Image (spheres, rainbow, N blue to C red):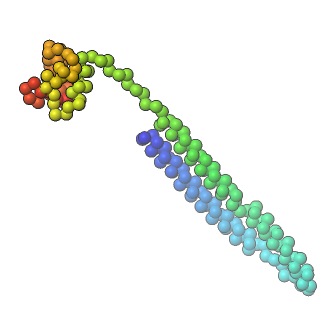
C-alpha cells in the first residue's frame, strides 16, 4: 500500500507538470493567433464590388491556413491523451506489483504445546487446567509441563490458582 501511495504521488506530480506545460502552450498559441490576425488584414479593393469579394475570400483562406499551422490545438489533445495513457500504464504496473499473492507461512506443526495454546486463544479471560485437559486430550503431566514452559517464555500468565491466560 505504501508503494502504491508513492507511485500515485509521483503520477500526480507528473500530471501537474504536464498541465502546466499545456497551459503554457495554450498561452503561446493564443499569442500566435493574435499576431497572425494582426498581420493578415483583408485589402480594401478599389473599384468594382465583384473584385472586392474575390479578394476578401482568399484573405480568409490564408488566415485559416496560418492559424492551422501555428495553433497546436491537435497537439494539446494528443499530449493529454499521451499523458493519460502514461498515467494508466504506471498505475497498472503499480497495481500488478502490489497485487502479488501474499506468501503463506507454513502451518505450525501440531505439537502438544500448540494444541494447548490454540485452545487457550478461545478463552480471553482464562482457562482452567481441567478444561485444557478435556479440550486437548493430554494428560496432567504434559499439561503442567507445557504451562510451566509457556509461562517462563512469557506466552501465558497465571490469573488464579489453576487458571491461565494468554498474554
| Front one among 32 and 99 | 99
- Asked if residue 67 is positioned above or below residue 99 in the image, the reply reads below
Which residue lies at the image location 42% right of the left edge and 27% below the top edge?
103
Which residue lies at the image location 70% right of the left edge and 71% below the top edge?
34
User: Is residue 46 toward the left or the right of residue 93 in the image?
Assistant: right
| Front one among 139 and 85 | 139
Which residue lies at the image location 14% right of the left edge and 22% below the top edge?
130
Position of the C terminus, as image quadrant, is top left
> Which picture quadrant has residue 110?
top left
The residue sitting at the bottom extreme is 47
> Which picture quadrant has residue 17?
bottom right
Position of the N terminus, as image quadrant, is top left
In the rendered image, residue 38, in percent from the top left (x then y), is placed at: 74, 74
In the rendered image, residue 5, in percent from the top left (x then y), is placed at: 45, 44
Which residue lies at the image location 81% right of the left edge and 72% below the top edge?
60
| Front one among 163 and 134 | 134
The answer to whether residue 9 shows anywhere in this view is yes
- Asked if residue 162 is positioned above or below residue 145 in the image, the reply reads below
- Asked if residue 104 is positioned above or below residue 43 in the image, the reply reads above
In the rendered image, residue 22, in percent from the top left (x then y), is placed at: 61, 58
In the rendered image, residue 129, in percent from the top left (x then y), is placed at: 14, 22
Tally the marks: 0
The residue sitting at the front extreme is 134
> Which picture quadrant has residue 52?
bottom right
The residue sitting at the left extreme is 161
User: Is residue 94 toward the left or the right of residue 49 in the image?
Assistant: left
The answer to whether residue 149 shows anywhere in this view is no
- Asked if residue 37 is positioned above or below residue 129 in the image, the reply reads below
Amino acid at each position: 500500500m505504501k508503494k502504491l501511495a508513492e507511485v500515485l504521488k509521483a503520477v500526480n506530480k507528473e500530471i501537474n507538470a504536464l498541465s502546466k506545460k499545456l497551459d503554457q502552450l495554450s498561452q503561446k498559441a493564443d499569442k500566435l493567433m493574435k499576431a497572425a490576425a494582426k498581420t493578415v488584414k483583408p485589402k480594401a479593393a478599389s473599384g468594382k464590388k465583384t473584385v472586392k469579394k474575390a479578394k476578401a475570400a482568399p484573405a480568409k483562406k490564408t488566415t485559416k491556413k496560418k492559424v492551422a499551422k501555428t495553433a497546436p490545438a491537435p497537439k494539446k489533445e494528443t499530449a493529454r491523451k499521451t499523458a493519460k495513457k502514461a498515467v494508466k500504464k504506471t498505475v497498472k504496473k503499480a497495481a500488478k506489483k502490489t497485487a502479488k499473492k501474499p506468501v503463506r507461512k507454513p502451518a505450525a506443526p501440531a505439537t502438544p504445546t500448540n494444541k494447548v495454546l490454540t485452545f487457550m486463544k478461545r478463552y480471553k479471560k482464562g482457562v482452567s487446567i481441567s478444561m485444557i485437559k478435556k479440550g486437548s486430550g493430554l494428560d496432567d503431566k504434559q499439561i503442567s509441563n507445557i504451562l510451566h514452559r509457556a509461562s517462563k517464555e512469557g506466552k501465558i500468565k497465571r490469573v488464579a490458582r489453576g487458571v491461565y491466560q494468554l498474554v
